[in-house]
Amino acid sequence: MSKPTENTKKTSASAENNRYFNEYANGIGYLNSIREFGADGKPERYAAQVSVIQGPADNVHYEYHDLIISSETVLGVVLEHRDAIEAEEANVLIRFNMANPRAKAFIYKQGERAGELGLR
């Protein structure tokens, strides 16, 4: 068996040291809904729709985000409150961290804004 060359060693080392840059945001908001999603042959994943609270305390507004739940611990806690959230029996306030937020374009299909472009 041959020994790896110096060039091979450098390639392997650089592959192990890949660095990534992410955008992070944190905030507080209300959980609106929880949904499962996934592709065939892949494990189910969960996302929560959050009404993020923004602005001055005496005049807040809300921005809506679908956050993918990536932590098993967080998923367990969120699922404990799923019935209350879906039945709208309680307001569940959360503190969250999100990475790499992205907007997804869509067209409103009904209501006052039917036919207009929106972002999720």
Image (cartoon, rainbow, N blue to C red):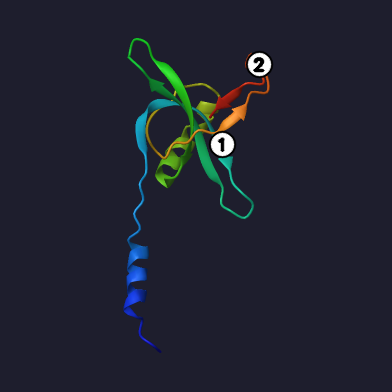
Amino acid of disc 2:
Gly
Q: Position of residue 105 (x, y in %)?
A: 57, 31
Q: How many marks?
A: 2
Q: Position of residue 33 (x, y in %)?
A: 53, 29
Name which residue lies at 36% across and 69% down: 11
Vertical position of residue 54 compared to residue 66: above or below: above
Report whether 72 appears left or right of 42.
left
- The secondary structure type at the circle numbered 1 is strand
Circle on res. 111: 2
Depth check, front residue: 106 or 32: 106
Task: Please tell me which of labels 2 and 1 falls first in the chain.
Answer: 1
Give neighbour class at mark 1: few <14, some 14-19, many 20+ (Cα, 10 Å).
Answer: few
Q: Position of residue 84 (x, y in %)?
A: 50, 27
Q: Residue 78's quadrant in the figure?
A: top left
Please name which of the two marks, 2 or 1, marks the residue nearer to the observer. Answer: 2
Amino acid of disc 1:
Arg
Circle on res. 35: 1
Vertical position of residue 62 compared to residue 13: above or below: above
Distance CA(mark 2)–CA(mark 1): 23 Å
Task: Identify the residue at the far top of this view.
Answer: 58
Q: Position of residue 50 (x, y in %)?
A: 47, 28
Name which residue lies at 64% across and 23% down: 108
- The secondary structure type at the circle numbered 2 is loop
Report whether 83 appears left or right of 28.
right
Task: Identify the residue at the far front of this view.
Answer: 7
Give neighbour class at mark 2: few <14, some 14-19, many 20+ (Cα, 10 Å).
Answer: few
Quadrant the N terminus occupies: bottom left
